[in-house]
Amino acid sequence: MHLFRILLLPFSWIYCAVTAIRNKMFDFGILRSQEYDIPIISVGNITVGGTGKTPVTEFLLGLLQASKRCATLSRGYGRKTKGVIISDANASYQSIGDEPMQMKLKFPSVCVAVAEKRREGMEKLLALPDSPQVVILDDAFQHRYVKPGLSIVVIDYNRPVRKDFCLPAGNLRESVSGLNRADVILINKCPEDLSRSEADSIRSKLKLSSHQQLFFSSISYKEPVCMGAQNTESFKSRIKENNKLLVAVAGIGNPEPFFESLKQYKLPLETLSFRDHHSYGIADLRKIEKLGQQTDSLRPEIITTEKDAIRIASIRGLSESLKNRLWYVPISLNFIFNEQNLFEEKVIDYVEKYN
């Protein structure tokens, strides 16, 4: 551990104690978790930074939206608004946040809501004429004022929680003992060839309770999609041109796996990182363009994440010619050990209990 983090350990112990006391207050009913008579699924984590919650939420929506009226409820991190907002045709990432906006664009039939206070958000959702039949709470594991019936915690395979510390010396939002509240623990971003023996080792270290189920998943990076309406070429066709350069841009919690995935194209790669949920502007476009001009490549292709694309697309002055060189990479969730059906059954059985 770095010296700086060692110096922060006393503050981590205080932080851990405060979160533990808060959790006990909920456990003993001093602070009250509101229950609702509809299925509520929480997708969260106990670490800061990207663990891959968004593809998990998207997987759940893809599974349930055909048979149920679904809604998502999140804080809407990074938005420029306050209070409860139910998204409509005028919604933007500035009004509801980039991840909720991504959900709205990808799942038009899903009701996307944001609220700092989840209980207020639930009340607004349930007051709608066509109120949702299932609500997915995004990033809500520590927001305990609404009680989920099924709690899914996502852990990054590359950042084992048993070796971590609470903030600020580490990345934990609360003690590892908080995992006891989870019904499902999903170890995400695993290598696709994860062995059974390693999976068993992870299971033994987590010390799961009898009511908990453990799953393992990896992230699959799909074929890049062009942001320009005029471009009908595929990404692979475009990069066949000579002297191509890729400029990779990411403003997410952990961009390294994304950058690493781009090495498959075997092209010169320049990377540019911004803080998570970065709000892009014209100055950023100039910086990106300048990075591409540092080589002999005449027209570098610019590639980013799906979440970043939501924010970049909103920049005023973004030309169509630049859009035709801008690409984003969709991602999806892949379950390891052929356990996708088992995960789906767990979710569907829970939801159907409310019929």
Image: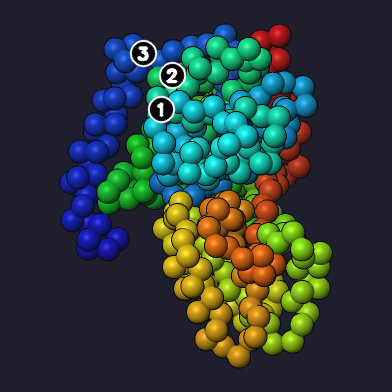
Which one is in front, 264 or 268? 268
Which one is in front, 133 or 115? 115
Residue 250 seen anywhere in this rendered image of the structure: yes
Residue 279 - label: none
Residue 139 seen anywhere in this rendered image of the structure: no
Q: What amino acid is at disc 3?
A: Arg
Residue 83 - label: 1
For label 3, the residue is 32
Residue 16 at what x, y percent from top left? 27, 37
Give the answer, above or below, for where 137 lies relative to 296: above
Kindly state the secondary structure of the residue where label 1 is placed.
loop
Give the spatial CA distance, label 2 vs label 3. 14 Å
Tag 2 and tag 1, C-beta contact below 8 Å = yes
For label 2, the residue is 120
User: Which mark is nearer the camera, 3 or 1?
Assistant: 1
Q: Residues within 10 Å of mark 1 (few under 14, many from 20)?
A: few
Give the spatial CA distance, label 3 vs label 1. 21 Å
Residue at (30% x, 46% y) in the render: 167
Q: What amino acid is at disc 2?
A: Glu
Quarter residue 150 falls in: top right
